[in-house]
Image: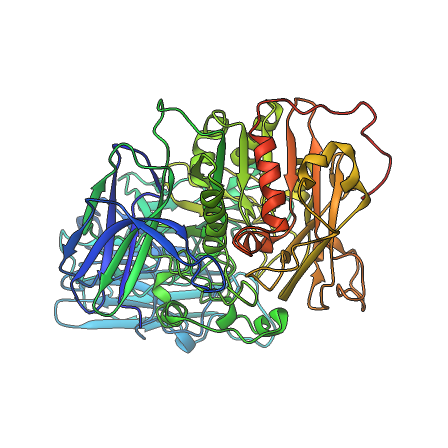
Amino acid sequence: MKTLLGYADQISVTAGDEIAFRVSSETAEAYDATIVRIVNGDLNPAGSGYREEEVPGTAWHIQGRPQKIHAGSCIVVDAAVPLDRLADGWSVTLLARPTLPDSSGQDGTGQVMFSLRDRMSGGGMEIGIKGEAGAYVTVQGSQARVTCAAGVPMRRHEWYRLRVAFDAAKGELTLSQAALESCAGIADSADVTVACSVEPAWTSAARIIIAARATAEGETIFGGFYNGKLEAPCLLDHAGAVIGQWDFSIGIDGQDICDQGPFHLHGHTWQMPGRAMTGHNWNGSIRAWQDAPEQYGAIHFHEDDIIDAGWATDFSWQVPPGLKSGLYAARLRSATDEDHIPFVIRRTAGTGHAPLVFVLPTASYLAYANEHLAIDAALAERVHDHVPVFGASDVFLAERREFGASLYDRHSDGSGIMISSRLRPVLNMRPKYQSWLGGTGSGLWQMNADTHIIDWLEHEGFDYDIITDEDLDREGIKALSPYRCVMLASHPEYVSTRMLDALAAHRADGGRLVSLGGNALYWRVVYHPTMPGVMELRRCEVGNGWITDPGESCHAFGGEYGGLWERIGRPPHETLGSGFIGQGFDKCTYFRRQADSYNPRVTFIFDGIEGDIIGDFGLIGGGAAGIELDRANSAKGTPLNTLVLARSEGHTNTYLPSTCALLINYAGQGAAQSDLVRAEIVFFETAEGGAVFSTGSIAWSGSLSHADYDNSVSRMTGNVVRRFIDPAPFELPASAARPVSF
């Protein structure tokens, strides 16, 4: 059972930086903390073995304490409401599109759309939705309460205009629930008035919360979260004068909420609900919210939104000078559990640099953070053709949904999760973690598979630095410019525009690029401009787990069109020479040398390699070719001077082509029947004296350590890296281009 969990405030630090660690000991056990450098995160005894190295002088003994995560998004209005203007009565109007209308909320008291309450006494009013009763309004006095409900349910994914009003003189409370589009035979609109002599027991501490209610537990702990879209809430006094009028179409790319009323009752979002969402008036003619923000005046709230766990710091560490750049972690150990909180130490600027930089694909780690696919996705076993095996972390996450899920998962209301964050414990981004997703054998996926590369770099004695995707996005080409060769990891699937631009600029400067994975540079993501560690994804045109709704394909963070880089016009083939073609998760196979491998341009790559078969061994699935595969395609941008050095073969029919590779699906597309799904190892030189080498397979890294690193996969990788860090420029033969399609 997991009892020890934590996260850090940063993912990348350098000498002199202070990094803070936030920890929850679920049973309040004491624990010991030590900083360690992670060399190999794989526990498989068939490999080189798990390796971590303690950093001297880093030892803490800490009395543990439980810390809670409070998931759920809402809007908090910071300013006090002029309550005297509401003494004779008030009214509220808003537009709502519920996504879980059958639910009475997590605590059974309703999903709150708009509230003005004192969090301690509960006095005030709230408007919400409660299952079959539909919309309701409750007025809480000092000793009594009155509720008025529509009495008819609201339909899922339909827009409604709600109006509630309290008339103190008449002693009446009125509610109107009106569907914007009626449906024959469906009663979902109503006007109800009840007697109400109870006046809201407001105090000066009362605050407006939109999409939730304040609670007595704390100023930043809310309840009654609403699921669905809200738009244009407006609070008026008895005479109809505006007190607050919130326009969500203003500042869509930020977290501030603008009040257009006279009292400037501005607010801010909490736990980052979805913005750049189509409103009730979206007419289908607009695809980018920047072109008509007035049609994107809705915010989508979820009871399980989580961006920041908000935990207090348990201990901090100032990074001393002289430590090797690498993957590190705060190792936590109690009497009953262990956890690692990973981070990267970069080389200090001005202290020299290695010729090689390994880019840790933390954007992809965030995309898969705390995924629930095998538990929630009905076809997981069939797609992967084996029974998932869950560890303690998987079981914990299945039970504790407040820790959030991945960008492959869905919210409780069925909508896709578009935003992920590292400001929470990410339990599948840990050394020693065994993934159900990573195929047979070691079963590694993402970070632990990438430690196979770190382990190999260490064994081969290469001088290298490590940076993260977050560094690359923030700094652009500046992060790569000191290095002659850039190495990409086993699965760098998610990349931002700034990251892709940096790789292109590096290549344009004569840099060298080594990609040791598959399904690389595939999806576009966007990092939040002011909140480090927060990332957004829009799965438009094609999906994986879910797909964006019509009109919502542009990111809220900056407005870029989302989806596959191939559909955006920058396919990975242009950068790496190959791109995603298909996947399978049962067994991995091998590569066979092709005619291009005997070209004199690549003699150095095959130095010391005998025979035609490469990589018929490995810790991941038993071979170097597998899991997710990339291959060349000149029609998608593979440079015409590219050499296809080797091609995989022997895959089973569980290996199927990507939906993007097919214009129509039909029988016989499995790898055992079709030649389409193959990984290809490719190489090409650039006009600037640089070169690119790509393996096209996620499983490649799991074969590096085979036979004590004395094998064809290790030797080929070493040959490439040694030549790529050599300053001698590559020469592009004048007749290298060839008019064929790969």
Name the foreground residue: 504 vs 200.
Answer: 504
Q: With 497 as the anchor, is 472 left or right in this view? A: left
Name the foreground residue: 479 vs 33.
Answer: 33
Residue 618, relative to residue 690: is it above or below? below
Q: Quadrant of residue 624?
A: bottom right
- Residue 18, percent across and down? 24, 38
Residue 472, relative to residue 132: is it above or below? above
- Residue 55, percent across and down? 26, 45
Split into 4 quadrants, where in the image is the N terminus? Answer: bottom left
Q: Quadrant of residue 227?
A: bottom left
Q: With 122 as the anchor, is 624 left or right in this view? A: right
For the image, the number of numbered tags is: 0
Q: Residue at x 57, y 23 (%)?
A: 727
Does the image show residue 645?
yes
- Residue 721, percent across and down? 57, 36
Q: Quadrant of residue 596?
A: top right
Q: With 727 as the anchor, is 731 left or right in this view? A: right
Split into 4 quadrants, where in the image is the C terminus? Answer: top right
- Residue 179, percent across and down? 51, 64
